[in-house]
Image: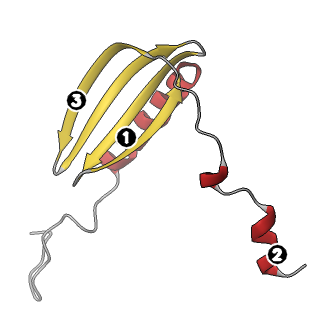
Amino acid sequence: MISNERSSLLRRWSDLPPKPHVVEDTLKSSQLQVERKFFVFSLKENSRGRLLRITEELGGRRNSIIVPSTGLADFKKILEEMISASEKLPSTFNEPPVEPGHNSAL
């Protein structure tokens, strides 16, 4: 099979019918700004269950991830591990450069 033929066998996103609108109730919402990024955390509920939608807005663009409520405890555990690692590991980019001949240990 020629590689050009394969692409015609795959359905394109534009060929798919639109997904039906799912009604979601917002149970709680919080916002956070970190530097130039703006985050919205929304705890929602729909016919399939509860979920956390995290939306990042930067320069007019939006990206979202959705975490089902059944995965929130695992999500929290990994996030706490990342915070701990960030606090313990030295940064190689945020520290001011050391001038030649200057001993930073003094």
Q: Is residue 10 left or right of residue 17?
A: right
On the image, the x and y values in percent for residue 12 come to 66, 57
Question: Measured along the vertical axis of the image, is residue 93 above or below residue 71?
Answer: below
Quickly name the residue at label 1: 84
Quickly name the residue at label 2: 5
Q: Which mark is residue 42?
A: none
Quickly name the residue at label 3: 31
Task: Indicate the amino acid at tag 1.
Answer: Ser
Please name the residue shown 57% across and 27% down the image: 20
The image quadrant where one finds the N terminus is: bottom right
- Label 3, residues with CA under 10 Å away: few <14, some 14-19, many ≥20: few
Question: Measured along the vertical axis of the image, is residue 55 above or below residue 91?
Answer: above
- Real-space CA distance between mark 3 and mark 2, rounded to the nearest whole angstrom: 47 Å
On the image, the x and y values in percent for residue 53 come to 42, 29
Q: Nearer the viewer, residue 63 or 39?
A: 63
Say which label, 3 or 1, has the lower sequence index. Answer: 3
Say which label, 1 or 2, has the lower sequence index. Answer: 2
Q: Is residue 104 left or right of residue 72?
A: left
Please name the residue shown 15% across and 69% down the image: 105
Q: Nearer the viewer, mark 3 or mark 1?
A: 3
Give the residue furthest to the bottom. 100
Please name the residue shown 41% across and 40% down the image: 64
Element carrying mark 2: helix
- Real-space CA distance between mark 1 and mark 2, rounded to the nearest whole angstrom: 49 Å
Q: Nearer the viewer, residue 77 or 42?
A: 42
Element carrying mark 3: strand
Element carrying mark 1: helix
Q: Nearer the viewer, mark 3 or mark 2?
A: 2
On the image, the x and y values in percent for residue 85 come to 39, 47
- Label 1, residues with CA under 10 Å away: few <14, some 14-19, many ≥20: few
Task: Indicate the amino acid at tag 2.
Answer: Glu
